[in-house]
Image (cartoon, coloured by chain):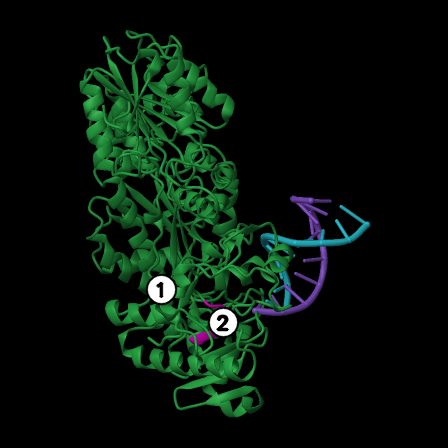
Chain colours: A green, B purple, C cyan
Amino acid sequence: MDMDLDDSSAATSGVQKGKRLLVMLVGAPGSGKSTLCENVMRASKRPWVRVCQDIIGNGKSGTKAQCLKSALSALDGGKNVFIDRCNLDKEQRTEFVKLGSPQIDVHAVVLDLPAQLCISRSVKRIGHEGNLQGGKAAAVVNRMLQKKELPKLNEGFSRIMFCHNDAEIQDAINTYNALGPFDDLPRGCFGERNHETKIQAGIMKFMKKIDAPSGTVPKESSVQSPAPHQSSDRTNHKFDRQGDGIGSTNLSEKQEKGNKETSICPSSDIPTLAFPSISTADFQFDHDKASDIIVEKVGEFISKLGNARLVLVDLSHGSKILSLVKAKAARKNIDSSKFFTFVGNIVNLSTKGGLCCSVIANAANWRLKSGGGGVNAAIFNAAGADLEAATRARAKMLHPGQALVVPLPSASPLYLREGVTHVIHVLGPNMNPQRPNCLDNDYNEGCKLLRQAYTSLFEGFMSILKMHGNELKPSQMLRGSDCHLDNCKQDSDQKNKRSDEYLLENSKKSRCSPVDTRDGEAVKGNERSRAKGWSSWSQALYQIAMHPERHKGDILELTEDVIVIKDCYPKACKHLLVLARAEHLDCLSDVHEEHLELLRRMHGVGLKWAEKFLQEDDPSLVFRLGYHSVPSMQQLHLHVISQDFNSTHLKNKKHWNSFNTAFFRDSVDVIEEVSSNGEAGIHDEGLLAMELRCHRCRSAHPNIPRLKWHIGSCKAAFPVALLENGRLVFRPTSAMATKP
DNA sequence: GTTCTAGAAC
DNA sequence: GTTCTAGAAC
């Protein structure tokens, strides 16, 4: 037997007589996977082998391929196998699941414990097999959990057991310990914490296929639910559809019965996006211009949507925008079965209007918050708190012209009642001086942004179609007498997939600063900033870069292409900014190959000032030069900052993490990346919320005062990564001071 | 970006 | 009670 395999002492020589099991453990470091294995292997009546990637390479960390080979060999040898590795995403699991066969059941046991608990266990442990302990463990666990993708039955598992605490882990241990050589465990998902159980019960009832697992099943057993079903096989032009007079079709009795019993709305086979007219209500955009743009954009996208439909919805029968769009669409010969207008409330199109739309658009506000009035308030109210949370998890704000696709949580009333699976938030241009970011009647910019908004919206819809398959016909699964649960699950899994792929923004990049938030106050500032959403306070550096003559007292150095100033709120003993003087260069994401020379000059100037401080002020200082991935202030600026971080202005986590996580992009790396890739990597703003760690010894600290107290005395060497490639600048005599 | 402050954490 | 954070307002 290979060194990586720990045979169960209770059944070392045993060979499995009945079906063998491959049990994949899924969980972060510190979740208790190895402990679970040990406990089962100690007491089980079956012969088990543990395949652990941390020790598979002659007692050291090995590869997935080695694990696969060992697992296969153990299974062939008649053993049951635990795959003891994190297996946190589907890709990591796929190859192992393929080892399943009629004689080998593949199970997953998910140790879905709180991240904090896993982190604290990982940080504390010593002698870990994979050497994941102490400081680096926290970062690793955090990173892994961010990408976590829980297993689903349709990956090929016959059984998945979710454990959320130690008691549930003990249940899992008992379950496997109790298994005799010929015992089987019930198939399905057990202990999953989501809201889908209720729906499943409804669906199962509707399908008359309730079939509770038996035997040693934990009583909370459930199976995954399909998404709300599109259960009608015909279109639903039932009530107030405006326009071309296509006849209405009433829902069949069976569908209505099913609908009533399951609380799931009937709908058509045809994927449909219902959207309100963007910007024409509260944002007071001219209706004639808006209707031109709607028809233009619908015409552009309709052919790309396959069999999917677009429906412009408005509450009012006398809606001017609907009439205009209807007339213009007819003149343009847009296929009225693919695009039509509809009078109704967008949050009850199915139950009150008989029009089933799996996707609805929301005329959102920039904060992506509920409230206000009109469609935004209606959708957030109808969808419940889950939509707010799901939205929040994906983005905190929108800029005019952008859209954000949000899969609607399955517990949402809008999902359950109306069959809405996705909401696409869209922010259009504002022409109302009483609302933020008013364009002051600038219809050049307004039309551009409105076009962008519809492009973002329709592309968002296309991304949903692409992901879920244009051709899905869940209605057949519901109706068909031979409907098989696995098919339903597979479909549901596809429909329920939650992924960042849903994020879609038409704007070329995410803007770099929050917009002015004040209702009723138009944002002043230059044209470009307004389009990008820079608010007045965030334009201070831009103003200096463009008008240095007005800021003579603040400027330390002025050249043709750069300006050096002191940071107004220094976060360290020495903290300068080197501003680029180029127009249209707001932040790192604007930087491309043509700026390489400028980047090098900025670096050179920054380095010169660091060396000046080292020679003339304090030779013990250490400097770092770099950019914030997403700056708060407009105009590309290089930070030259000493690493003492001794400043009263350093007050919060964001301050610290903006200089001490990957959010801070070292100038040398930026130059290298732009040189080789044409652009610099932008790192996630989520890094700003990470735990506080000393930049030298990497120790974690609970709050800013404690961290500052620590860094005041920490003399540990800087991490190796910072010492490489001239990322840190020491006094000139140091061998480490290098130029890129 | 900062300031202010409610309320969570201690 | 005080300290600290995080979100809103600017």
Q: Is residue A33 visible?
A: yes
Q: Nearer the viewer, residue A12 or A261?
A: A12
Q: Nearer the viewer, residue A506 or A552?
A: A552
* For discs 2 and 1, the disc positioned in front in the rendered view: 2
Magenta-drawn segment:
A631-641
Above or below, A617 relative to A500: below
- Residue A235 in the image, given as x and y percentages of width and height: 27, 37
Label located before the other in sequence (2 or 1): 1
Q: Position of residue A324 (x, y in %)?
A: 34, 60
x and y, in percent, of residue A156 in the image:
25, 26
Q: Is residue A201 rendered to the left or right of residue A541?
A: left
Q: Is residue A642 magenta?
A: no
- Chain to which the residue tagged by mark 1 belongs: A
Same chain for mark 2 and mark 1? The answer is: yes
Secondary structure category for the residue under label 2: loop
Q: Residue at x 49, y 68 (%)?
A: A632
Chain ID of residue with mark 2: A
* Residue A276 spot, x, y in % from top left: 40, 52
- Residue A100 horizontal side relative to residue A622, left or right: left
Q: Secondary structure at mark 1?
A: loop
**Identity of the amino acid at label 1?**
Lys
Closer to the camera in the image, A324 or A220: A220
Q: Amino acid at mark 2?
A: Val
A365 vs A612: above or below: above
User: Which residue does the image show at 39% across and 43% down from the upper left?
Assistant: A144
Say above or below: A645 vs A703: below
- Check the picture and name the quadrant holding the N terminus of chain A: top left
Residue at horizontal 34 percent and vertical 9 percent from the top: A45
User: Which image quadrant: the C terminus of chain A?
Assistant: bottom left
Q: Mark 1 — residue?
A: A509
Q: Which mark is residue A719?
A: none
